[in-house]
Amino acid sequence: MDAPGSVQRTREFGSTRLWDGLEPPQIARDAVEEGGEVDEAEPLETVLREFEAWLEKEEDSKWPPSDGGDWDLNQMLPTETKRKGIQGIVPPALHRWCNIKKPFSEALACKPMGMDGMLQKMHIDLVGHHHLGIDDARNIAKIVQDLVVNHRRTIDVTAQLTMRRLRQ
């Protein structure tokens, strides 16, 4: 983020396909039906390297990545990179993040809820399809913008990978 209300983004879509052909083809068909471009996606290793290079060019990269929970960066990314044998290339910027449920529940004095519930409570329209990666990213960005601009919240690190998790 450069200033309140602005969002910096990268437009890469990483493939989680197994390159040995073992992944069920239904996953790819489902992703394409939901608007994904699985066959055109770069391998996860390429996307992680390009993300790190993109981030190095950003003047204001002090903002932590934001997510609608801890599962993606704390569980899925380490598991997927280990499965692919590329766990050593996860950029340090993805070792810590802001689970937006925390600043959201503090700002609106309510229990943490999922992305769809946060959007509804903030009167923000859902963009695209729920659980489609790029659409979720856009919706999370809208929530973050609203928290910063309308609720005067800072987006701070709420969670990080432990050394144990990084080595797994």
Image (cartoon, rainbow, N blue to C red):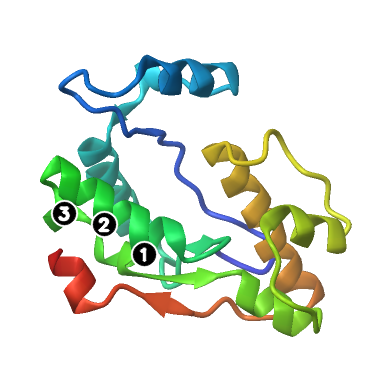
Report the amino acid beneath label 2: Pro
Report the amino acid beneath label 3: Gln
Residue 89 is situated, as x and y percent measured from the top left of the image, at 16, 53
Residue 106 visible in the picture: yes
Q: Which of marks 3 and 1 precedes in the sequence?
A: 1
According to the picture, the residue beneath numbered tag 1 turns out to be: 74
Numbered tag placed on residue 78 in the rendering:
2
Residue 36 is situated, as x and y percent measured from the top left of the image, at 51, 24
Which is more toward the observer, 58 or 156? 156
- Quadrant housing residue 120: bottom right
Q: Mark 2 to mark 1: distance in Å?
A: 7 Å
Q: Are marks 2 and 3 in contact (CB under 8 Å)?
A: yes
Residue 61 is situated, as x and y percent measured from the top left of the image, at 41, 66
- Secondary element under disc 1, as helix, strand or loop, is helix
Numbered tag placed on residue 121 in the rendering:
none
Is residue 81 depicted above or below 129 in this figure? below
Q: Residue at x 63, y 55 (%)?
A: 140
Q: Are marks 1 and 3 in contact (CB under 8 Å)?
A: no
Residue 57 visible in the picture: no
Residue 77 is situated, as x and y percent measured from the top left of the image, at 32, 53
- Quadrant housing residue 145: bottom right
Q: Residue at x 53, y 64 (%)?
A: 69
- Quadrant housing residue 47: top left
Q: Is residue 136 left or right of residue 58?
A: right
Numbered tag placed on residue 87 in the rendering:
3
Q: Are marks 2 and 1 in contact (CB under 8 Å)?
A: yes
Q: Mark 1 to mark 3: distance in Å?
A: 13 Å
Q: Mark 2 to mark 3: distance in Å?
A: 7 Å
